Structure formats: C-alpha cells, structure tokens
Amino acid sequence: MRWPGIAGGRRVSAEEGAGKTSPASAISGSGPRHVHFLGICGYAVSGAAILAQQLGHTVTGSDEHAYPPVSDIVTAAGIPWENRHDPANLDRWGVPDLVVVGNQVRPLNEEWLEAKRRGLPLSSEVEFFVSLTEGRLRLAVCGTHGKTTTSALLIHMLDRCGMDPGFRLGSTSLDVGGSARLGTGPFVFEGDEYTTAPWDPRPKFLHMRPAAACVTRLEWDHPDVYPSPEAYRTPFVELAATMPADGLLVLCGDDPEALSLRDHATCPVTVYGEGEGAGWRVTRLADDGRVQRFRVAHPERAIPEVALTFPGRHNALNATAALALASFAGAPIPECVAACADFRGPARRFEILGTAGGVTVVDDYAHHPTEVWAAINAARARYGRARIIAVHTPHTYSRTLTLLEDYRRSFEEADLVVLGPIEAARERGQAATVSSADVAARVTGREVHLVGGSDEGVELLLRLARPGDVIVVLSLGGFDKIARRLHTALRERAAEARRG
C-alpha cells in the first residue's frame, strides 16, 4: 500500500509490547485510508487529525476527560470520536489502517494495548507530522518556557511574508487559525520535551530533525519524567549534538543553561539576548500600554525598531528568537518586524479578554513558577501601577512539590493572590502529596485567598474586583474557563449598573 501524504507507521512486535522501542518504518499505500487518533483532543493530535482529514483520509478518534475548546474543534470538524478510551473503539468505525497515539496516552491504556496486541500499524503524533514534512525546511522552537508564543510569532512572520508556512502548535494561533497547517513552505514545530508515546520515553523534539532550532531557556520541569535537572538537560544536549552541519542553533544568551549547549553543537550557533555577547542584542525601550518597543542590534543586518503587542522582557526575547529563525528561513526582516505590531498570539498566552466595569481580565497558560512570575511581571510592565490580582492553579502534584520553593518569588509583583486546587491532570487518581495551601504558605507580603473551585473563585473575584484592577488568570487547564466566566460576569454586572 502507498499512503498519499502519510508515512511513519509500522506494526509492533510482541517483543515491543513492553514499549521499549519507537515506530520507525513507513507504511506506503494509495488512496484514502482510515486513521484513528488516540488522545484526539490534545492540541497537536487534533491538528494532526484535521490535516489527515484534509488529505482525504477517514479520521476517527478517542480521548478521555476531554474538554473545550479542542473537543469542540474536533466535533466541529465532523470527526467521529468517543470521550472514553475503549478497545471497542478500534472496531466502532471499522478497523483502522493506522493508529496515531498522542503522548498523553498512558502505557496501561486499554485501547492502545489492544491496538498493539492486534499488531495494528502505529505511529506517534510527532512522527506522523514528521512524515508529512519530508523534504521541507523544518524549524523547531524548544526550551522550557516560551515555546508556544515564539512558535506562533514565527508562524505569523512567515505567513506575513507570503511563505505559506506549515506548523504544529500546542495551542490555537489567533493570527492564522488552528493548531496545525500543512502549508507548502517552511514547517514550524513547537518542540515539546515531554515523552513521545507509551512506547517511546524520548522527548518529541528529538524526532523532528530540524534544519534550525532555538532553545529559549533551560530550567528543570516535568519531574515526573526527568528526576533531576541533569536528566532534563540531557535531551537538549542530544539535540545540539545532532543538528545538521549546515543548520543553525539559536540560543538565549541570557540563560547560562541554554547558552551552555553551544559547547555541544554540530552546527553554527547564534546567540540572542540583552548581554554584550549576543549576536542579536536586545535593548528594551518602553511599554506604552499597547505595545512594548525595543531595538535589536545585529552586526550584519539593519533591523527596524520593534513594536510588539505582547508585554514583558521574556516576550521581547521570544520575538528576537523568532526573528533569528525567520531570517534563517529567508524571510525579509522588515516584514517580520512589522508582523510583531499586530501579533494576536496563541490562545491563552497573555490573551486579553477585555475590560468590563473598569476591570481588565487576562487569560494565561502559565503553570511553572517561573512562568507565573514572568506573566505577572509582564502585566506590571503593561499596566503600571494598577492593582494586579493573580489567579493561579498549580499543575500536577509532582511539579508543585518539586518546585514548591520557587513559588516564593512567583507573586512578587501581584497585589493579591487567589489560588485554586492543584490540577492533577495525568496524575489523576494519585495520592495528593502537596496542596495549594503549601503554595500559599510560600507567598509572603500580600493577601492570599484559597478557593475550592471555580464557582467559589468567580464569586470571590466579583467581590474583590474594583475599577482599575487587572485580573491575570494563570492556569494550564484554564480552571473551568474561569477567565471567560469572570469576564462575562463583570460585563453583566456593568450592564446592570448602567440600567440602574
């Protein structure tokens, strides 16, 4: 069989039942085939499913505990799917020709185990994307923080330049739409360091084989997979050591851990940052409440002053990384700089939902203590002396416990803090080893409230909020859409007040 536009699957042997190796050989065939996606309501997997559908294949899927917006996106695309993993799903719409497995699918998942037992062709989600992009210029955005925003801005730059980029993004681009697009030009991968699939514990970015990659920052994360900072750093070293000789590695010079990767690089390295040794050197100017302005000096390029819609030092650095990768891809720098001025960003990355009754609501994905700190500091840079109320739900017991002491500085620029319950996510069912009360104990010098759920949170915030406040919601799972629910409630309250 030859598959139009799809490769990267293979049958799994009994020996591989323990999940010790990853899929490698391609399936080939002609005509449409049936592709079944496990974990279909993840951003990346849903994007892969929609691309497969656009290529003419029959697409089905399954997930569990799925929730909007991605579940709504999959349903709106007309893809049949079940919100539970079940071996019966492998027969529900006919036996699939290929099963694509997302990394959120656990090794003891019964549907995945049944597919393996039957010897059905299998592919991880990222290898599925790689198979679609053979022969394309691949760009990967890696690092602990800023991957999604940097990737989304790079995509927006290339799109603005008419280069028809393809992409795989861990969110929805508010500029070009969707979490994935095939395109015909350079292909942008958000380079996730989490595991690839139940049978493959390697990080996804090691499958991408990019011509150019950037590393935004290296800071220990995912302690459920990487038991130490050294273990976390190891795959990034491998990335640097396996880059093509004619490629490019872009490193943040302001982060010593990221910069240290240049010692392992097998390709040219360029550095960006505020330090003197940076080839793309950033000088920040000011934030006028709408955009932040900064300059980027380069020894060989004249770069116009940058006006960027997103606030904060970290976003100035993210934009500079995107400029460096776009330049490698052949994009004209002036057009890329112009794209910064109307960049809407990815969903839930400092997404300003609006102002109602004088209260501004911002929805953000921050879940690592450093990301929480950066997002709140960005809000301070944008909104000056406004009272900032930070609403946060820590993510996973393992991350919260391991990084608990890092929370001591996370809320330094917040005036008031509201903490919801820890999001167990993939650790659902495990015994709680830590709670949000432990996080609250690390927050000093400001008022802290603990709430048991989003309803209680909305009620509390409606009591606390006053005109001029900025409420920043910081949550990977979105805390039951609390940001949008709060914004709606504030609008309704303001409308009622106008009616008198």
Image (cartoon, grey):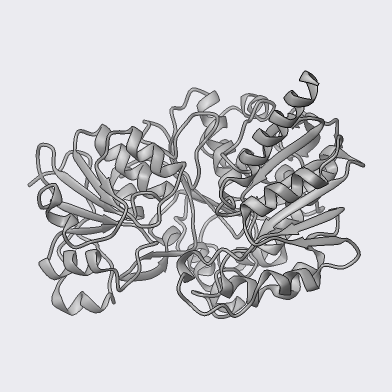
User: Is there any visible trace of residue 273 in the rendered image?
Assistant: no
Q: Is residue 479 left or right of residue 36?
A: right
Closer to the camera in the image, 311 or 497:
497
Residue 92 sits above or below residue 490 on the image: below
* Quadrant in the rendering for residue 242: bottom left
Q: Residue furthest left?
A: 1
Counting from the top left corner in percent of width and height, residue 466 is at 85, 39
The total number of labels drawn is 0
Counting from the top left corner in percent of width and height, residue 231 is at 54, 77
- State the quadrant of the C terminus: top right
Counting from the top left corner in percent of width and height, residue 346 is at 57, 39
User: Is there any visible trace of residue 398 in the rendered image?
Assistant: yes
Residue 109 sits above or below residue 312 on the image: below
Residue 212 sits above or below residue 136 on the image: below
Q: Residue at x 77, y 69 (%)?
A: 440
Q: Is residue 494 left or right of residue 47?
A: right
Q: Residue at x 67, y 24 (%)?
A: 338
Q: Is residue 54 left or right of residue 70?
A: left
Residue 361 sits above or below residue 461 on the image: above
Q: Residue furthest top?
A: 499
Q: Residue at x 79, y 25 (%)?
A: 497
Q: Residue at x 49, y 64 (%)?
A: 425
Closer to the camera in the image, 215 or 91:
91
Q: Is residue 434 left or right of residue 329?
A: right
